[in-house]
Amino acid sequence: MIITRRILKTLLLVIVAAGITNQLFAQDARTITIDDAIELALEHNMQIRNAGYELRISESSIRETRSGFLPRVSVDAQYANNLKLPVIFLPPGSPFGDVLEVGTTHNMSMNAQVTMPLYNQSLITGLSLARANEELSQRIKQATRQEIVTEVQRAYLNVLLTGESLRTLQFSFDRREANLELVRSMHEEGMVPEFDLIRTSVQVENLKPQLRMAENAHTGSRNYLKILTGVSIDEEIRLLETLEELYASRWDEVPPQLLERNLVRNPDLLRQEAQLQLARQQLRMSRASYFPSLSLFGVNTYQAQGDQFRPFDYDWINTANIGVSLSVPIFSGFERRYQTQQARIRIEQQESQRAFLKESVAAEYENTLDQMFQARESIQAQKRNLSQAERGYNIARVGYENGTQNLMEVNDAELATTDARLNYLQSVSDYIRSRLDLELTLGLP
């Protein structure tokens, strides 16, 4: 009895000292809540940034396509030196001979040209295609934001789960070490057999690998959360809430919209629908190449020539004209035909993928819903199991102090308590993860 109280008192002092040390170190760590983590991720996460860049590119593509309806102005200049003057052939018997040289050595011209499309189906369809691409980029950005928000919450919960599991195992390890010291002292005094010492020592050693694995898992989960939120790997963080507090405050009640399989806001389906619309616009773009195009043009030209290179002494002649240009595509091989055929096949492919995705999402929703309710039931069962395990441990400890229980029964009861605590934490984590998956599947904010 004296030895037991001495060890328990020492253990209590160690735990209190460790808690004070943790508090001192935690003062320098950044404290974040789950909402802080979401906000940091939305601001710094690289996937969201990349989706934003793609959206900006799509918006710029729309402006680029619209500029195709504006006039085009170009200015060009040309200089040609006739090393051999051009000739014209004269009929036989001409007084000027058979060949007559024409032109001059130096020839210069400058042109200013303005063109503006009056009707161009490719430009009109291209604008619709650019808008469809922007819609797809917008859907991708929204889906990325929803997925990152869900992933950050999962990562935050995983840090809490691994941290609390680590503390549970550490507490169990400390109690078993205290029991080992007690058994060693009693064995030296001849009060217990060597078998009790061996078995207790083996139980302590068996727990060390689990403790190391828990430490590694906790470190890995913290680093992953830092990556998602843009926090430096070298910066220490401390999570404010506990797993049970989040469960009680955020996810204890099941909202009715989770029980309705309304998939119209599912991010994957919205993204797939945008891809289908883009494929349809690409088909329209292929068909637009069959339409004629009508353009307005105007040309203003200055030209001069001479045998001596004296451009400022030349007599520059100005000519100007305006007109309308009509281009009618008739035949260019079978290029347009095959491009249209490929666009139709892409539409069929996207429609097939949409049908398959819709069935897959519906099945995923049903499976996740079942997992959520199973995890919810498991929480209550594990909570009762944990209460029973703690009561069993207290009974075994009191019985050992009174001499009615042996130390092995105390160790077994302590092991059952540790397992019950870990199972309870895992059930809470499984339930919250299922809730998050359901919210993501339904596209809920």
Image (cartoon, grey):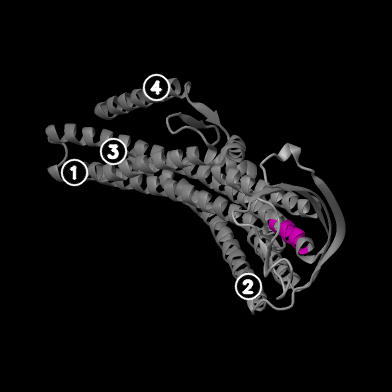
User: Which corner quadrant of the image does residue 194 belong to?
Assistant: top left
Residue type, label 3: Arg
> Which dot, 4 or 3, sits closer to the camera?
4
User: Which corner quadrant of the image does residue 42 belong to?
Assistant: top right
The tag earlier along the polypeptide, 2 or 3, is 3
> Which dot, 4 or 2, sits closer to the camera?
2
Bin the neighbour count of mark 2 within 10 Å (Cα to Cα): few under 14, some 14-19, many 20 and up.
some
Residue type, label 1: Asp
> Which dot, 2 or 3, sits closer to the camera?
2
Residue type, label 4: Thr
Element assignment for label 3: helix
The image shows residue 326 at horizontal and vertical percentages of 82, 67
The tag earlier along the polypeptide, 4 or 2, is 4
> Which residue sits at x=22%, y=32%?
181
Mark 2–mark 1 distance (CA, rounded to whole Å): 73 Å
The tag earlier along the polypeptide, 2 or 1, is 1
Q: Image check: 65 left or right of 208?
A: right
Q: Image check: 409 left or right of 239?
A: left
> Which residue sits at x=67%, y=46%?
56
The image shows residue 426 at horizontal and vertical percentages of 47, 50
Residue underneath mark 4: 21
Residue underneath mark 1: 196
Residue underneath mark 3: 176
The image shows residue 63 at horizontal and vertical percentages of 75, 49
Element assignment for label 4: helix
Residue type, label 2: Arg
